[in-house]
Every structure is written in C-alpha cells, then in structure tokens.
Image (cartoon, rainbow, N blue to C red):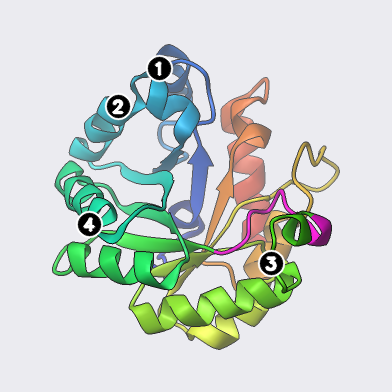
Amino acid sequence: MINFAEADTMRDRLIVGLDLPTLKEAERAVRELEGAVSFYKIGYQLAFAGGLDFARELASGGTKVFLDMKLLDIDNTVAKGVENVVKMGMTMLTLHAYPKTMRAAVEAAKGSELCLLGVTVLTSMDEQDVIDAGYEYDPHTLVLRRSEQALHAGMGGIVCSAEEAEAVRRIVGPDMAVVTPGIRPSGSDHGDQKRVVTPAQAIRNGSSHLVVGRPIVAAPDRRAAAEAILAEMQSA
C-alpha cells in the first residue's frame, strides 16, 4: 500500500470533491482545474450519474481518484466490493469504521495500492446528532475510538474533522493518511458542515489530505479558488 501520510507537495494533498449533479459538469470542472489539481473525490451524487465510469477514465489517465462510497454491509459483500474497486484503479476508498467491516476490507485489498479510509464521524454531525444516533460517546471520543480500531485493523487512513486531526495523528502515528473534509477557506460560508476549519489550520493540525468541494466547484473561477486554497495550505 502506498504511504499517503507524507504527500510530496500541497498539490498532492488537495482533493477536490466533484459534488456535481451531472457528468458533463464534472468533466468541465476537471478541464478547468487541469494543471492545478491532480486528485478528485467522487461520491454518491456523481456516482449515480455515470461517475463510476468517469472515475475509471480519470484513473486510467493517471489522475488520482478518491471513491467516497462509505461502504457498510456484511463482510462478504464489502470484501467483494473492495475487490472490484481495486480493479478500477482507485487511489482511495471510504468505508464506515466498524471493526468487522474494516478487517474484511483490508483482507480484500491486501497486496494492492488501494488506500482504505475509515470514516469516523461525519463532519455534518455535532454532539446532539451523535446522541440521536444512539452512541454513548461524544463526537471527539467516538472519533478517537474508531481511529484506534482502524489502526489495529490495518487501514490506510482515517477520515475525520480537521478539528480532531491532531489527536487522531497522535493515535495512528506518522504513516497513516488523515483525510479531512469540512474545509472552508477563511471567510467562506460553512453550508451544512458543523465541524469545519480553514486549509491552513487543517495542515497545522496534522491532516495529510484536505477534501474541498463546494468552495471550489461552486466558485465562479474554479481554478482561482483552487489556487487560493493551495496558497492557504502553503502558508501553514
């Protein structure tokens, strides 16, 4: 498995979320960002609009793709899904950080370069949301518990809020990726995210990769928005 914890440049550490409704719009965004961005996230919205074939196309051309599927199912189903994601040439894949699920996925991805990421607590969730979901832990405690379980399962990395990245890094050590969504440039709208930080803060907190969607893809000038975020990351 590739070690993603220490990417060579900030450009390697910025993942642009192609959170767009159509394949045509995603293709346009990639064209506009060519040369500035080398890593993209494809989630449910685009996946269900032809995005899986687009993910294969990007990967075959040498672009890194983070497939954000947040898998959770019985062990065999997860394992078979992971095996096919490996064949697609994806760089990263998310699954919920349940111990049995993670162990099944790690076994299925063994020998490949796919980096499996354990999703701890969604950045749209606060303490009340976690309580309503039936957990006895507050979000911070739950993130740390799941991070430790991901480490023991042999996962490639963790997805968490950058607010928790420093504490997570202390648990997982220097080699695992710590991927943080909920990134918002200074002065921008938080949207539906509740646990957010700026790009520079995320880097300082120990994030290996930053996932940025709407602040880039919804910007009037996507390339300028991406370059501004890269500059913020460089300033950390």
Q: Calculate the distance from the C-alpha at mark 3 to the C-alpha at mark 4.
A: 26 Å
Please report whichever mark, 2 or 4, sits nearer to the chain's N-terminal start: 2
Q: Position of residue 129 (x, y in %)?
A: 77, 54
67 to 24, vertically: above or below: below
Nearer to us of marks 1 and 4 is: 4
Please report whichever mark, 1 or 2, sits nearer to the chain's N-terminal start: 1
Q: Calculate the distance from the C-alpha at mark 1 to the C-alpha at mark 4.
A: 31 Å
> In screen coordinates, is 206 left or right of 63?
right
- Residue at coordinates 63% horizontally, 66% vertically from top-left? 203
- Residue at coordinates 60% horizontally, 41% vertically from top-left? 227
Q: Amino acid at mark 3?
A: Tyr
Q: Calculate the distance from the C-alpha at mark 1 to the C-alpha at mark 2.
A: 8 Å
Check disc 1: other Cα within 10 Å, few if <14, some if 14-19, many if 20+. Answer: some
> In screen coordinates, is 229 left or right of 15?
right
Q: Which residues make up the magenta segment?
A: 120-128
Determine the secondary structure under disc 3: loop
Disc 1 target residue: 23
Nearer to us of marks 1 and 3 is: 3
Q: Position of residue 177 (x, y in %)?
A: 45, 69
Disc number placed over residue 76 in the picture, else none: 4
